Amino acid sequence: YFNLYETSNLTISAEPVDAGIVSISGLIIPENNWSAEYFNDIPMEITAIANPGYRFSHWEGINQDESEATITLNQNLNLTAVFTESSNEFFINEFLALNNSIIQDEAGEFDDWVEIYNFGIESGNIGGLYITDDADNLMKWMIPYGTEIQPQSFLLLWADEEQEQGEMHMNFKLNGEGESILLVEHDGISILDSIYYGTQSPNISYGRMPDGGHVWQYFESPTPDSSNSGSTGNILGD
């Protein structure tokens, strides 16, 4: 049985301060070096979320190198999410898994789509990277060589299993009931960016706010191939 009469203090911080944020059981910690009292012996899910320009490295305070971890307190704990600078400038920025009437592809079809954003200040060659919806098949679809995204601009990829319709048509569809989307490095192993999403609604996209930012939200007015900043929706933490 859980001992609900004993408590411990949990202190959470990020290093460097502006490199990322931490959530506990889905709730974003509001400030750095934040502390609260919790009951002992109750498992809690913690997640480190890197800001653009950084990647998660490891935790200090627990022996864990994954960004998602489970902790159980039995004494006071000081926990730090350590981030390092990242050269990654490409992000999964927005997607629509149930495109009923928002935007048509070249064939006049309303297909699923994924938008990639170049956060950098220079044109970026994204050709040779992979995108997949299957963590067991990281090289499922390769972005064609020579594909470039202008700085602070977007690339729209169609998830329709109809590659014969054009170079930007992928060999998989998005699952409206929830799955993962992963952007993978040229080596077919290193994950540059990823998002796991739950059940989706027709014609409502899910994307970052602002472009390349760490907060994900639903957009009642999707913005394929354009900035998310001008749209509105319900903000949900990553």
Image (cartoon, rainbow, N blue to C red):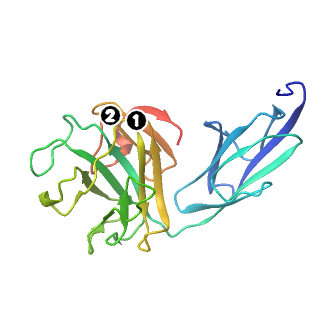
Considering the image in quadrants, where does the N terminus appear? top right
Residue at coordinates 28% horizontally, 37% vertically from top-left? Answer: 98
> What crowding class fits label 2: few (fewer than 14 Cα within 10 Å), some (14-19), or many (20 or more)?
many
Name the amino acid, label 2. Answer: Ile
The residue closer to the viewer here, 18 or 133, is 133
Secondary structure beneath dot 2 equals loop
Would you say residue 119 is visible in this rendering? no
- Quarter where residue 137 is shown: bottom left
Percent coordinates x, y for residue 215 in the rendering: 51, 43
Q: Amino acid at mark 1?
A: Tyr
Q: Residue furthest left?
A: 107
Relative to residue 111, is residue 57 drawn left or right? right
- Determine contact: label 1, label 2, CB under 8 Å: yes
x, y percentage for residue 51? Answer: 56, 55
In the depicted structure, whether residue 209 falls above or below residue 162: above
Q: Residue at the location (82% across, 40% down)?
A: 73
Identify residue for label 2: 204
The total number of labels drawn is: 2
- Left or right side of 212 for 156: left
Q: Secondary structure at mark 1?
A: strand
State which tag comes first along the sequence, 1 or 2. 2
Q: Position of residue 78 (x, y in %)?
A: 82, 49
Residue 109 in the image: x percent, y percent? 13, 43
Q: Which mark is residue 26?
A: none
Q: Do we see residue 98 in this rendering?
A: yes
Report the front residue among 169 and 233.
169
- Disc number at residue 218? 1
Q: Could you say which is closer to the camera, residue 107 or residue 21?
A: 107
Badge 1: residue crowd in 10 Å (few <14, some 14–19, many ≥20):
many
Please name the residue shown 44% across and 47% down the image: 210
What is the CA distance from the residue labelled 1 to the residue labelled 2?
Answer: 6 Å
Direction from residue 88 to residue 225 in the image, left or right:
left
